[in-house]
């Protein structure tokens, strides 16, 4: 794994999204994408290129700005993990997607064994609890 400089965190996540070929999974319990056009554009462009984009948030938490995304959104109870991955690359972060200049630990998984372990964690603990949410309810609730 490689630990990133905090100034490279969001750039690395956007690059991961922009370089996806098949799918993108975003797991961020708390979100505030208000005014974060570069990230929102990268996510929507991936979706426009017919790349499946799945966005997982914590159940019942406000998620400002994600209602503007053309993605599948899921709520997960008790979610606290933060991870971002495609068919070939993965990033784990201590930070949520909140468009603040926080200092967070972010690292890129560099080998297939680490990647497979992350996918196994996601498949075992996050995906089975995920419930799709209606974007209309996001607009009303937030």
Image (spheres, rainbow, N blue to C red):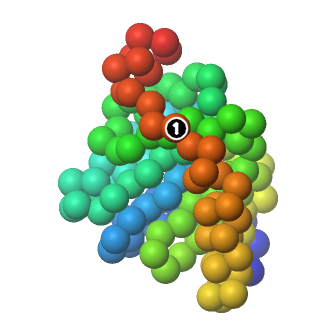
Vertical order, 5 against 82 (above or below): below
Q: Nearer the viewer, residue 21 or 72?
A: 72
Q: Is residue 131 left or right of residue 107?
A: left
Residue 41 visible in the displayed image: no
Vertical order, 127 against 67 (above or below): below
Q: Nearer the viewer, residue 38 or 136?
A: 136
Identity of the residue furthest to the front in this view: 128
Number of callouts: 1
Horizontal and vertical percent position of residue 64: 50, 25
Horizontal and vertical percent position of residue 65: 44, 29
Vertical order, 37 against 42 (above or below): above
Q: Is residue 110 left or right of residue 45?
A: right
The N terminus lies in which quarter of the figure? bottom right
Residue 60's image quarter?
top right
Pointer 1 local density, CA inside 10 Å: few below 14, some 14–19, many at least 20: some
The residue that appears at 49% across and 80% down in the rendered structure is 88
The residue that appears at 38% across and 44% down in the rendered structure is 72
Name the secondary structure under disc 1. strand
Q: Which residue is mark 1?
A: 131
Q: Is residue 73 left or right of residue 108?
A: left
Horizontal and vertical percent position of residue 21: 33, 74
Vertical order, 64 against 28 (above or below): above
The residue that appears at 53% across and 53% down in the rendered structure is 26
Residue 88 visible in the displayed image: yes
The residue that appears at 34% across and 71% down in the rendered structure is 22
Identity of the residue furthest to the top in this view: 140
């Amino acid at each position: 794994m490689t630990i990133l400089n905090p100034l490279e965190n969001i750039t690395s996540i956007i690059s991961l999204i922009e370089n996806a070929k098949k799918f993108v999974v975003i797991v961020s319990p708390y979100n505030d994408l208000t005014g974060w056009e570069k990230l929102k554009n990268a996510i929507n462009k991936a979706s426009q290129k017919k790349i499946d984009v799945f966005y997982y948030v914590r159940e019942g938490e406000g998620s400002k700005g994600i209602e503007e995304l053309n993605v599948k959104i899921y709520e997960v109870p008790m979610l606290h993990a933060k991870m971002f991955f495609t068919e070939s690359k993965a990033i784990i972060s201590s930070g949520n997607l909140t468009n603040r200049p926080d200092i967070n630990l972010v690292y890129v998984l560099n080998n297939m064994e680490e990647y497979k372990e992350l996918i196994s964690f996601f498949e075992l603990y996050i995906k089975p609890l995920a419930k799709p949410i209606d974007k209309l309810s996001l607009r009303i609730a937030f």
